[in-house]
Amino acid sequence: MTKITLYEYAPTRSARCHWTLLEAGLAFESVGGSPEILGSEDLAAVHSLRKLPAARIDGKPLFESAAISTAFADLVPEQGLIASKHSVRTASSAISDHHVTVQTAPSI
């Protein structure tokens, strides 16, 4: 089982990481929840600038909310939280098959 620790505090973007974990149904440990986390050595061990959110996935540090949420979603591809590589290729192929005409406004 994957061990996940989320370092979080409400006024940061950690809410999106927390939400992703809940949607994914993944078990995790939450560290923080108060301003004291910002100055903690626990957080400094994960992110040298002590910024939130931060996470550890099986002991490996990760930060930036989009990267963290994507990593969580990648752990449960069957949940469909992000597009698969196949569906992204299909969508981009469909877009490139259509021609776009750009019209400009007449000059006055």
Image (cartoon, helix red, strand yellow):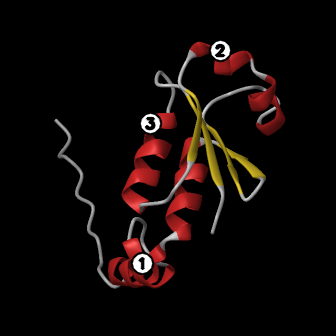
Ranked by sequence position, the earlier of labels 2 and 1 is 2
* Number of the label disc, if any, that sits on residue 3: none
Find the distance from the CA under tag 2 to the CA under tag 1: 36 Å
* Horizontal arrangement in the rendering, residue 18 relative to residue 45 (left or right): left
Find the distance from the CA under tag 1 to the CA under tag 3: 22 Å
Q: Position of residue 17 (x, y in %)?
A: 49, 45
The residue identified by callout 3 is 15
Q: Position of residue 30 (x, y in %)?
A: 56, 38
The residue identified by callout 2 is 36
Confirm or deny contact between disc 3 and disc 2 (CB under 8 A). no
Ranked by sequence position, the earlier of labels 3 and 2 is 3
- In depth, the one of 4 and 102 nearer the eye is 4
Q: Amino acid at mark 1?
A: Glu
Q: Position of residue 85 (x, y in %)?
A: 50, 79
Find the distance from the CA under tag 3 to the CA under tag 2: 17 Å
SS at mark 2 in the image: helix
Between circles 2 and 1, the one closer to the viewer is 2
The residue identified by callout 1 is 78
* Horizontal arrangement in the rendering, residue 102 relative to residue 69 (left or right): left
| Residue at (51% x, 26% y) in the render | 12
Between circles 3 and 2, the one closer to the viewer is 2
The local crowd at label 2, few if under 14, some if 14 to 19, many if 20 or more residues have their Cα within 10 Å, is few
| Residue at (74% x, 30% y) in the render | 43
Q: Amino acid at mark 2?
A: Glu
